Image (cartoon, rainbow, N blue to C red):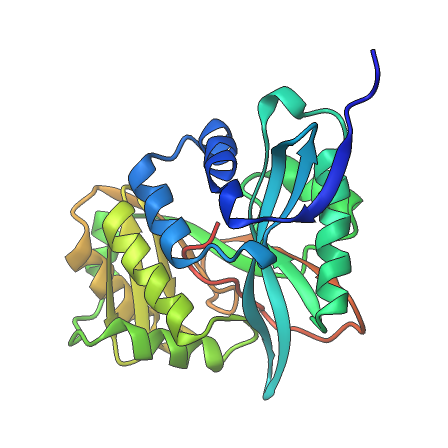
Amino acid sequence: MPSAKIELRTALPQDEPALRENWRECFGDEDAYLDFFFSRRFVPEDTPVVESDGKVVSQLFLLPAALCAGAQRFPAYYLFAAATHPAYRGRGLMRTLLGEAERLSRIRGQFAVVLLPGEESLYRYYARCGYEAVFTRRSWRISRQELSAYGRSVKRTDALPVLDKLFSARDGLLWDANALRYALDEYRLFRGEYAASDNVFVCVSGEDAECICTPDRFPEALGLLSELSDRPELCLRFPADIPFGTPEKGGMIRYLTERIELRNAYVSFSME
């Protein structure tokens, strides 16, 4: 049997039905979520794909962001929702597609490509493709009693400017206002609830929770979480400079030019 003809290219608007089909097959998301993403974040020229015999079978999305390192900012892509249709796996298509994403990123003057693997096996896979586990975080399975004991009450405020301030003040991935607005809307529509004070952001989805703050504001984060959730226990994740919990890998980077020093670098809350 002759080998299938493979073509690497960026997506076209008419590829959207095939992109949606692959996404559903790989991630199981419903049409409402896909409608939301494709109407607000899909940019065909930022979507490398593999076409096999006339059908898009593998894809990933490059979302524009920046790397924050102290006072410096570097253009970067966040690699999101990489997917190969199950019928076409085991052929090296994703590795080929990652190489194409790297090539496009270099041509476009990007400093790096960042991603957040969803499981340990994917860290090993992306490491073989040249990515480094640079980003960090901590986790703490915290009880309702601990939230009440350590939490501090605080006045809520609008989340968008708080998130922008928090991410701009620490090493890690930095989103623009439109991306942050999308992430907040996506979280509330499809995941759970969030809240912010002047110096803290928290979000809760089921038993999973996240907070972004500096160590001195951690009690305020716990106070907000105790208001958002009445669950007996939460699996809480937060930046690694907060000295509690268990250290974890928190994302990977593929440097395209020089390497830079990142301290306790963090990837934002909703783009896994």
Where is residue 144? Give x, y as percent.
Answer: 22, 48
Q: Is residue 34 above or below residue 259?
A: above
Image point (59%, 46%), residue name: 60
Quadrant of the rendered image containing residue 57: top right
Q: Above or below — where is 259 with respect to 233?
A: below
Whole-percent x, y for residue 272 in the image: 48, 49
Quadrant that contains the N terminus:
top right
Residue at the (21%, 50%) spot, across then down: 145
Q: Nearer the viewer, residue 234 or 176?
A: 176
Q: Is residue 154 visible?
A: yes
Left or right: 129 as drawn, with respect to 215: right
Q: Nearer the viewer, residue 163 or 140?
A: 163
Q: Position of residue 191 (x, y in %)?
A: 29, 46
Residue occupying the point 41% across, 50% down: 38
Quarter location, residue 56? top right
- Compared across the picture, whether 140 is left or right of 150 comes to right
- Residue 226: % across, % down: 19, 57
Whether residue 249 is visible: no
Numbered label tally: 0
Residue nearer the viewer, 48 or 114: 48
Instruction: Classify residue 145 as left or right of residue 173.
Output: left
Q: Residue furthest right?
A: 2
